[in-house]
């Protein structure tokens, strides 16, 4: 009998068991950061994104729609993902919930796909329960489902505050690696590195 498991219900253990998936140390993200140059005009735009985020979060938590509009969309534009040869597909949101001090907090993970090689998962962050790694099992599930496993696949987990990149390689025994967590709250260099990595990955998936 075929068992259906929804992406929102998956754990890393489920994926490790079903696909023989392994976490590996890979210095690629560290190396790639230094391979692409962020221009002065791009730095100014990134500083503006950070300033916008810090200003708006003074008033309320940001929904996933606000994160996409204020943080993610400008980043994708700077990385040229809205220009040929790239196309972006939107997927159905995944609902998540967690109990925090006796209160059920609901959120969602919204999925964007670039060229079927880069999966971007945006998390609505309304509680500390929903840190950026909440989306990792779902991201890996989408990446593993891609039929073309000969080429590396990439993921980006975003909650507005933090960014983590994922790389998946291999067919019979897939392996994934993670970047450090980049924070929009840290000095501007962290956001520069996020754009550097997006631009580098864009060059790989063209």
Image (tube, grey):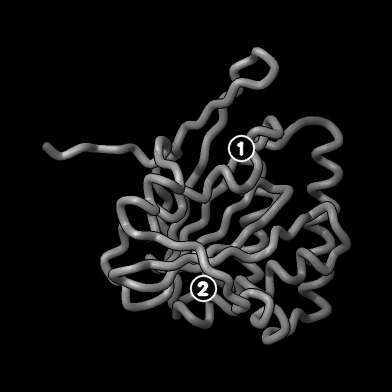
- The x, y position of residue 45, in whole percent, is 78, 66
What percent of the width, then of the height, locates residue 72? 63, 55
Q: Is residue 55 left or right of residue 194?
A: right
Residue bearing mark 1: 124
Instruction: Determine the CA span between mark 2 and mark 1.
Output: 27 Å
First of labels 2, 1 by sequence position: 2
| Crowd rating for badge 1 (residues with CA inside 10 Å; few <14, some 14–19, many 20+) | many
Question: Does residue 130 lie above or below 168 as drawn?
Answer: above
Q: Quadrant of the C terminus?
A: bottom left
Residue sitting at 60 percent across and 78 percent down? 28
Which of the two residues, 80 or 99, is positioned nearer the viewer here? 99
Residue on which disc 2 sits: 83
Q: Nearer the viewer, residue 25 or 90?
A: 25
SS category of the residue bearing label 2: loop
**Residue 74 is drawn in which quadrant?**
bottom right
- Name the image quarter holding residue 76: bottom right
Work out which residue is located at the far left of the displayed protein and give it. Answer: 1
What x and y, as percent, mark residue 133?
Answer: 59, 48
- Residue 57, compared with residue 103, is above or below; it is below
Residue found 50% across the figure and 44% down from its top: 110
In the rendered view, tell whether residue 137 sits above or below residue 88: above
């Amino acid at each position: 009998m075929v068992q259906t498991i929804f992406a929102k219900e998956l754990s890393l253990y489920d994926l490790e068991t079903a696909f023989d998936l392994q976490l590996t140390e890979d210095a690629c993200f560290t190396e790639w950061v230094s391979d692409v140059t962020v221009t002065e005009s791009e730095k100014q735009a990134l500083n503006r994104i950070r300033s916008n985020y810090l200003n708006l979060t003074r008033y309320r938590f940001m929904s996933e729609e606000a994160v996409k509009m204020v943080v993610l969309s400008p980043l994708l534009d700077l990385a040229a993902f809205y220009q040929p040869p790239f196309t972006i597909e939107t997927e159905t949101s995944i609902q998540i919930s967690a109990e925090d001090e006796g209160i059920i907090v609901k959120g969602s993970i919204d999925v964007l796909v670039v060229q079927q090689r880069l999966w971007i998962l945006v998390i609505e962050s309304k509680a500390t329960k929903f840190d950026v790694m909440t989306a990792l099992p779902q991201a890996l599930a989408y990446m593993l489902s891609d039929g073309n496993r000969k080429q590396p696949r990439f993921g980006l987990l975003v909650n507005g505050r933090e960014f983590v990149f994922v790389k998946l390689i291999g067919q019979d025994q897939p392996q994934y690696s993670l970047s450090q967590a980049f924070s929009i709250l840290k000095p501007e260099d962290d956001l520069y590195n996020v754009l550097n990595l997006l631009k580098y990955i864009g060059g790989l998936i063209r």
